[in-house]
Image (tube, helix red, strand yellow):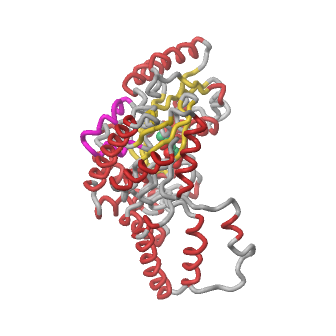
Amino acid sequence: MTPDEFRAAGHELIDWIADYRERLAERRVGPDVAPGEIRAMLPAHPPSSVVEFGDVLADVDEIVLRGTTNWLHPSFFAYFPSNASYASVLGDLLTAGLNVNGMSWVTSPAATEMETLMLDWMGELLDLPPRFASGGDGGGVIQGSASEATLVAILSARWRSTHGAVNADGDTSRLVAYLTAQTHSSIPKGLRVAGIGEDRQRIVDHDEAFAMRPEAFADAVTADLAAGLVPCFVCSTHGTTSSMAFDPTPELAATCARNGIWLHVDAAMSGIGALAPELRWVNAGLEHADSYCTNAHKWMGVNFDCDLYWTVDRAALLGALSILPEYLRSSAAASGAAIDYRDWQIPLGRRFRALKLWFALRLDGVDDTISMVRDHVGWTQWLADEARRDERFEVVAPHPLNMVCLRLHAGDSATDALIEAANATGEALFTRTVLDGRTALRFSIGTATTTRHHVDAAWRLLQQLAT
Ligand code: PLP
């Protein structure tokens, strides 16, 4: 492709994306395809000749979109919010165009310094405790996903609990971690990767609001200490994926402080709510946390991948992850004046992801996001009231923000059938969960283009299909 061909195709592609988004509401939300159907529509072998850009776009229309779940659809109420503002998409295009590898300060100073600043800006906008800011012992970094952020937190905790020995002498066989049955699956996965197996993952009791019981956490720690084990890490979730529960971080913190347990707060799905001053309660207890993450690529609308991760203990992070081969040495890093973000994550290479955050903050700001958050929270409360008024439905968990879990009194199979029937229409998309052994439909309102009308239509659809 020549530069001129790139220009022409680029304009065409931008137009295509804008058209797709403008007409998204006319499409099904979820695709109606069977496994293997999309692959079967594509040639089995690599092409032996090249085609025009228009031919590729035609296949996108005919084949790719046929098998695409439209996450940006205004009637997408599944999983979690996943927005991607135009501004951030343009920033990401620039990232691809520059193709910088920002693994170290010296490999692209702007990539590093803008990332540090963006995390400081976000800390200010979310009103995070100042100890997360880059000026002191802490600081922030963009991770690809909350799962990566959690793994980094676990490895920092492991480093601290093994007194800096993570090799053969750093015995991890006695380390214990604490979570609840509602904790996101990425946490047990990260623990497994870090060598803290299921036999040393304590599933602490939760209360009727699906939040960790602090006294059960304290008891579990006491029992583990008595057994000669080493309590190492707890994940306190602010907005669980399954039911939007908030673990009581302020109450868990005392046990952590007494026993040197790393307190990680996972607010991947809901932490962005703190952009709205009246919702800052979602930050409760962060002043005690060792690390924190929230996903700008969910509710905030900086396109995937943009997890914001902060730690207050850079030394533990670097201790756990820093390895310095000769070919990566630089005088800038050796001077201590520069950050090498390769030491803050698992992979070496890293994209210039700060650009999309910078574009989003400068071109859009956060006022529209705050209004959107307020709308989503308000509509969720309206929806929960509606569901309570319909005697066939039950609201099965607290719904302090933008998700409500519903269930049919008729039982698990009826609730499952309702989810399946609603999704099959293509008019809306929901996901199921199981809360204390009972099936529930998660109605998550998080898409930037969703209006009250879409919420209303989706609720009427559920009412029509309910038994
Ligand atoms: N933690 C919570 C609370 C989540 O809701 C999610 C995703 O929904 C994750 C972690 C994992 O996020 P990611 O896909 O960024 O790894």
Residue 138 visible: yes
Q: Is residue 54 magenta?
A: no
**In x, y percent, where is residue 107?**
48, 62
Which residue occupies 43% across, 48% down?
Answer: 295
| As drawn, 299 above or below 107 | above
| As drawn, 220 above or below 460 | above
For the N terminus, the image quarter is: bottom right
Residue 141 visible: no
Question: In the displayed image of the protein, which residue is found farthest to the top?
Answer: 226
Task: Tell which of 307 and 71 is nearer to you.
Answer: 71
**In x, y percent, where is residue 48?**
72, 83
Question: In the displayed image of the protein, which residue is found farthest to the right?
Answer: 45
Q: Which residues are magenta?
A: 270-288
**In x, y percent, where is residue 232?**
54, 26
Task: Tell which of 101 and 294 is nearer to you.
Answer: 294
Q: Is residue 278 magenta?
A: yes
> How many numbered dots are placed on residues in this image?
0
Which residue occupies 66% across, 25% down?
Answer: 199
Which residue occupies 53% across, 13% down?
Answer: 222
- Magenta portion: prevailing SS class: helix
Which residue occupies 68% across, 65% down?
Answer: 37
**Left or right position of 45 against 228:** right
**Left or right position of 49 against 60:** right
Residue 361 in which image quadrant: bottom left
